[in-house]
Image (cartoon, rainbow, N blue to C red):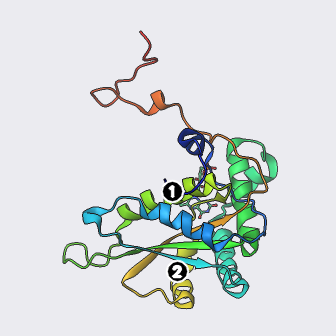
Protein backbone atom coordinates (compact mmCIF):
# COMPACT_ATOMS: atom_id res chain seq x y z
CA UNK A 1 0.00 0.00 0.00
CA UNK A 2 2.83 2.41 0.75
CA UNK A 3 5.11 1.25 -1.99
CA UNK A 4 7.81 -0.10 0.28
CA UNK A 5 8.93 -3.52 1.29
CA UNK A 6 7.40 -5.66 4.02
CA UNK A 7 8.99 -5.25 7.37
CA UNK A 8 7.63 -6.97 10.43
CA UNK A 9 6.20 -4.48 12.92
CA UNK A 10 7.47 -6.36 15.95
CA UNK A 11 10.90 -6.84 14.49
CA UNK A 12 11.10 -3.07 14.04
CA UNK A 13 9.88 -2.35 17.57
CA UNK A 14 12.18 -4.92 19.18
CA UNK A 15 15.35 -3.91 17.35
CA UNK A 16 15.09 -0.13 17.30
CA UNK A 17 17.46 1.25 19.89
CA UNK A 18 19.85 4.18 19.86
CA UNK A 19 22.18 3.56 16.92
CA UNK A 20 24.90 6.13 17.49
CA UNK A 21 27.70 4.63 15.43
CA UNK A 22 26.83 5.58 11.87
CA UNK A 23 28.59 5.29 8.54
CA UNK A 24 29.19 8.58 6.72
CA UNK A 25 27.54 7.23 3.53
CA UNK A 26 24.89 9.62 2.22
CA UNK A 27 21.18 8.83 2.49
CA UNK A 28 18.89 9.16 -0.54
CA UNK A 29 16.69 12.27 -0.01
CA UNK A 30 13.68 10.18 -1.13
CA UNK A 31 14.27 7.94 1.91
CA UNK A 32 14.58 10.95 4.19
CA UNK A 33 11.17 12.09 2.98
CA UNK A 34 9.74 8.60 3.54
CA UNK A 35 10.79 8.53 7.19
CA UNK A 36 9.45 12.05 7.70
CA UNK A 37 6.19 10.95 6.10
CA UNK A 38 6.02 8.11 8.64
CA UNK A 39 6.59 10.70 11.38
CA UNK A 40 3.65 12.74 10.12
CA UNK A 41 1.37 9.71 10.55
CA UNK A 42 1.69 10.33 14.31
CA UNK A 43 -1.18 11.78 16.34
CA UNK A 44 -1.36 15.32 17.70
CA UNK A 45 -3.86 17.29 19.76
CA UNK A 46 -6.70 18.52 17.51
CA UNK A 47 -4.68 17.07 14.64
CA UNK A 48 -2.71 20.32 14.66
CA UNK A 49 0.32 18.57 13.18
CA UNK A 50 2.48 21.24 14.76
CA UNK A 51 5.78 19.78 13.55
CA UNK A 52 8.48 20.90 11.16
CA UNK A 53 11.48 18.70 10.39
CA UNK A 54 14.67 20.51 9.43
CA UNK A 55 16.99 18.23 7.48
CA UNK A 56 20.66 19.13 7.58
CA UNK A 57 23.30 17.48 5.39
CA UNK A 58 25.71 20.34 4.60
CA UNK A 59 29.06 19.87 6.28
CA UNK A 60 29.42 23.45 7.53
CA UNK A 61 26.08 23.28 9.31
CA UNK A 62 26.89 19.85 10.77
CA UNK A 63 30.21 21.19 12.06
CA UNK A 64 28.44 24.14 13.68
CA UNK A 65 26.04 21.81 15.47
CA UNK A 66 28.74 19.27 16.34
CA UNK A 67 30.89 21.89 18.06
CA UNK A 68 28.01 22.81 20.32
CA UNK A 69 26.75 19.27 20.88
CA UNK A 70 30.25 18.30 21.99
CA UNK A 71 30.51 21.25 24.38
CA UNK A 72 27.14 20.26 25.85
CA UNK A 73 28.31 16.68 26.25
CA UNK A 74 31.50 17.82 28.00
CA UNK A 75 29.43 19.69 30.60
CA UNK A 76 26.94 16.86 31.09
CA UNK A 77 29.46 14.01 31.19
CA UNK A 78 30.10 13.84 34.95
CA UNK A 79 33.31 12.65 36.64
CA UNK A 80 31.43 9.56 37.87
CA UNK A 81 30.35 8.74 34.33
CA UNK A 82 33.88 9.25 33.05
CA UNK A 83 35.00 6.72 35.61
CA UNK A 84 32.35 4.22 34.51
CA UNK A 85 33.52 4.53 30.90
CA UNK A 86 37.15 4.14 31.95
CA UNK A 87 36.75 1.27 34.41
CA UNK A 88 33.53 -0.50 33.63
CA UNK A 89 32.99 -0.11 29.88
CA UNK A 90 31.20 -3.44 29.45
CA UNK A 91 28.43 -2.85 32.01
CA UNK A 92 25.10 -1.76 30.53
CA UNK A 93 25.67 1.76 31.80
CA UNK A 94 29.23 1.77 30.56
CA UNK A 95 28.19 0.70 27.08
CA UNK A 96 25.45 3.34 26.92
CA UNK A 97 27.82 6.06 28.03
CA UNK A 98 30.52 4.91 25.64
CA UNK A 99 28.04 4.97 22.80
CA UNK A 100 26.82 8.46 23.80
CA UNK A 101 30.43 9.63 24.04
CA UNK A 102 31.13 8.20 20.59
CA UNK A 103 28.23 10.17 19.15
CA UNK A 104 29.38 13.37 20.84
CA UNK A 105 32.84 12.91 19.33
CA UNK A 106 31.67 11.93 15.83
CA UNK A 107 28.39 13.73 15.30
CA UNK A 108 29.93 16.00 12.62
CA UNK A 109 30.36 12.88 10.45
CA UNK A 110 26.78 11.62 10.50
CA UNK A 111 25.25 11.94 7.02
CA UNK A 112 21.92 13.39 8.12
CA UNK A 113 20.73 15.46 11.05
CA UNK A 114 16.99 15.85 11.45
CA UNK A 115 15.81 18.54 13.85
CA UNK A 116 12.28 17.88 15.07
CA UNK A 117 10.68 21.23 15.81
CA UNK A 118 7.25 21.80 17.27
CA UNK A 119 5.00 24.83 17.59
CA UNK A 120 4.53 26.61 20.88
CA UNK A 121 1.10 27.17 22.38
CA UNK A 122 -0.28 30.68 22.08
CA UNK A 123 -3.21 30.53 24.52
CA UNK A 124 -2.82 32.41 27.78
CA UNK A 125 -2.42 29.40 30.04
CA UNK A 126 0.33 27.74 28.05
CA UNK A 127 1.84 30.54 25.98
CA UNK A 128 5.35 29.70 24.88
CA UNK A 129 5.30 26.06 25.95
CA UNK A 130 6.13 23.66 23.15
CA UNK A 131 3.51 21.10 22.12
CA UNK A 132 5.80 18.32 23.34
CA UNK A 133 3.10 15.67 23.33
CA UNK A 134 2.91 15.87 19.57
CA UNK A 135 6.56 15.42 18.80
CA UNK A 136 7.40 12.13 20.50
CA UNK A 137 4.93 9.83 18.72
CA UNK A 138 6.13 11.37 15.44
CA UNK A 139 9.77 10.86 16.36
CA UNK A 140 9.24 7.23 17.34
CA UNK A 141 7.42 6.61 14.05
CA UNK A 142 10.35 8.18 12.25
CA UNK A 143 12.84 5.93 14.06
CA UNK A 144 10.79 2.79 13.35
CA UNK A 145 10.39 3.65 9.69
CA UNK A 146 14.11 4.36 9.45
CA UNK A 147 14.73 0.92 10.95
CA UNK A 148 12.60 -0.54 8.18
CA UNK A 149 14.94 1.03 5.62
CA UNK A 150 18.02 -0.19 7.48
CA UNK A 151 18.77 3.31 8.79
CA UNK A 152 19.97 3.86 12.34
CA UNK A 153 18.76 6.76 14.48
CA UNK A 154 18.95 8.09 17.98
CA UNK A 155 16.86 10.62 19.83
CA UNK A 156 19.01 13.38 21.31
CA UNK A 157 18.34 16.60 23.17
CA UNK A 158 21.74 17.91 24.09
CA UNK A 159 21.84 20.48 21.29
CA UNK A 160 19.18 22.47 23.15
CA UNK A 161 21.87 23.62 25.59
CA UNK A 162 23.06 25.81 22.70
CA UNK A 163 19.60 26.05 21.21
CA UNK A 164 19.65 29.81 20.59
CA UNK A 165 22.78 29.62 18.45
CA UNK A 166 21.64 26.53 16.57
CA UNK A 167 18.19 28.00 15.93
CA UNK A 168 19.76 31.22 14.64
CA UNK A 169 21.97 29.22 12.27
CA UNK A 170 19.01 27.16 11.02
CA UNK A 171 16.57 30.08 11.00
CA UNK A 172 14.09 28.42 13.38
CA UNK A 173 11.55 31.13 14.33
CA UNK A 174 10.63 31.78 18.00
CA UNK A 175 7.14 30.30 17.49
CA UNK A 176 8.81 26.89 17.24
CA UNK A 177 10.86 24.84 19.69
CA UNK A 178 13.69 22.79 18.23
CA UNK A 179 13.41 19.95 20.72
CA UNK A 180 15.09 16.89 19.29
CA UNK A 181 18.04 16.20 17.05
CA UNK A 182 17.95 12.83 15.30
CA UNK A 183 21.26 11.81 13.75
CA UNK A 184 20.46 9.29 11.00
CA UNK A 185 22.54 7.05 8.78
CA UNK A 186 23.48 3.48 7.95
CA UNK A 187 24.69 1.68 11.08
CA UNK A 188 28.20 0.52 11.79
CA UNK A 189 26.95 -1.75 14.53
CA UNK A 190 24.40 -4.54 14.66
CA UNK A 191 20.71 -4.28 15.46
CA UNK A 192 19.76 -5.71 18.81
CA UNK A 193 16.99 -5.80 21.32
CA UNK A 194 17.09 -2.79 23.66
CA UNK A 195 17.99 -3.48 27.29
CA UNK A 196 14.76 -2.97 29.18
CA UNK A 197 13.01 -3.97 32.38
CA UNK A 198 10.53 -6.84 32.02
CA UNK A 199 6.98 -5.70 31.27
CA UNK A 200 5.63 -7.38 34.42
CA UNK A 201 8.11 -5.41 36.53
CA UNK A 202 6.57 -2.14 35.37
CA UNK A 203 2.92 -3.26 35.42
CA UNK A 204 0.50 -2.86 38.33
CA UNK A 205 -2.88 -4.56 38.25
CA UNK A 206 -6.00 -2.62 39.22
CA UNK A 207 -4.14 -0.78 42.00
CA UNK A 208 -0.78 0.86 42.26
CA UNK A 209 1.82 -1.57 43.60
CA UNK A 210 -0.07 -4.80 42.84
CA UNK A 211 2.13 -6.98 40.67
CA UNK A 212 1.86 -10.42 39.11
CA UNK A 213 4.79 -12.74 38.68
CA UNK A 214 3.20 -14.35 35.68
CA UNK A 215 -0.05 -14.17 33.76
CA UNK A 216 -0.16 -17.86 32.89
CA UNK A 217 -2.58 -19.65 35.21
C1 LIG B 1 14.05 12.73 25.14
C2 LIG B 1 15.33 11.96 24.94
C3 LIG B 1 16.54 12.64 24.89
C4 LIG B 1 17.73 11.95 24.68
N1 LIG B 1 18.91 12.67 24.57
C5 LIG B 1 20.05 12.01 24.24
C6 LIG B 1 21.25 12.76 23.98
O1 LIG B 1 21.28 13.99 24.06
N2 LIG B 1 22.35 12.07 23.63
C7 LIG B 1 22.34 10.71 23.50
O2 LIG B 1 23.39 10.14 23.15
N3 LIG B 1 21.23 9.98 23.73
C8 LIG B 1 20.08 10.60 24.08
N4 LIG B 1 18.92 9.86 24.28
C9 LIG B 1 18.93 8.39 24.10
C10 LIG B 1 18.88 7.62 25.42
O3 LIG B 1 20.07 7.79 26.12
C11 LIG B 1 18.64 6.12 25.10
O4 LIG B 1 17.41 5.96 24.45
C12 LIG B 1 18.64 5.25 26.36
O5 LIG B 1 19.89 5.28 26.97
C13 LIG B 1 18.30 3.80 26.03
O6 LIG B 1 19.23 3.26 25.14
P1 LIG B 1 18.77 2.51 23.81
O7 LIG B 1 17.93 3.48 23.04
O8 LIG B 1 20.04 2.18 23.10
O9 LIG B 1 18.04 1.30 24.23
C14 LIG B 1 17.72 10.54 24.52
C15 LIG B 1 16.50 9.86 24.56
C16 LIG B 1 15.31 10.55 24.75
C17 LIG B 1 14.01 9.79 24.74
- Tell me, yes or no, if residue 157 can be seen here: no
Which labelled disc corresponds to residue 163? 2
In this figure, which residue is indicated by the disc labeled 1? 2
- Horizontal side of 108 relative to 153 (left or right) equals right
**Location of ligand 1 given as a quarter of the image:** bottom right
Residue 163 coordinates in the image, percent (x, y): 52, 80
In percent of the image, x 57 and y 90: which residue is there?
169
Residue 59 coordinates in the image, percent (x, y): 73, 84
Q: Is residue 150 above or below residue 53?
A: above
- Horizontal side of 95 relative to 50 (left or right) equals right
**Residue behind label 2 places its C-beta within 8 angstroms of ligand 1:** no
In percent of the image, x 33 and y 76: which residue is there?
120
**N-terminal of the two: label 2 or label 1?**
1
Label 2 neighbour load within 10 Å: few <14, some 14-19, many 20+: some
- Horizontal side of 136 relative to 197 (left or right) equals left
Residue 110 coordinates in the image, percent (x, y): 72, 70
Residue 99 coordinates in the image, percent (x, y): 72, 56
Amino acid sequence: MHGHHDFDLYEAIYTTRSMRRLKPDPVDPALIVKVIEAATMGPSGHNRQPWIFVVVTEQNSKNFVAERYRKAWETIFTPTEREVVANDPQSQRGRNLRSAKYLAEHIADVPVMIFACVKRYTDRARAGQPMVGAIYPAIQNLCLAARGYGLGTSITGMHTMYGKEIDAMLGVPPEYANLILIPMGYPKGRWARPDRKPALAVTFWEKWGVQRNSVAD
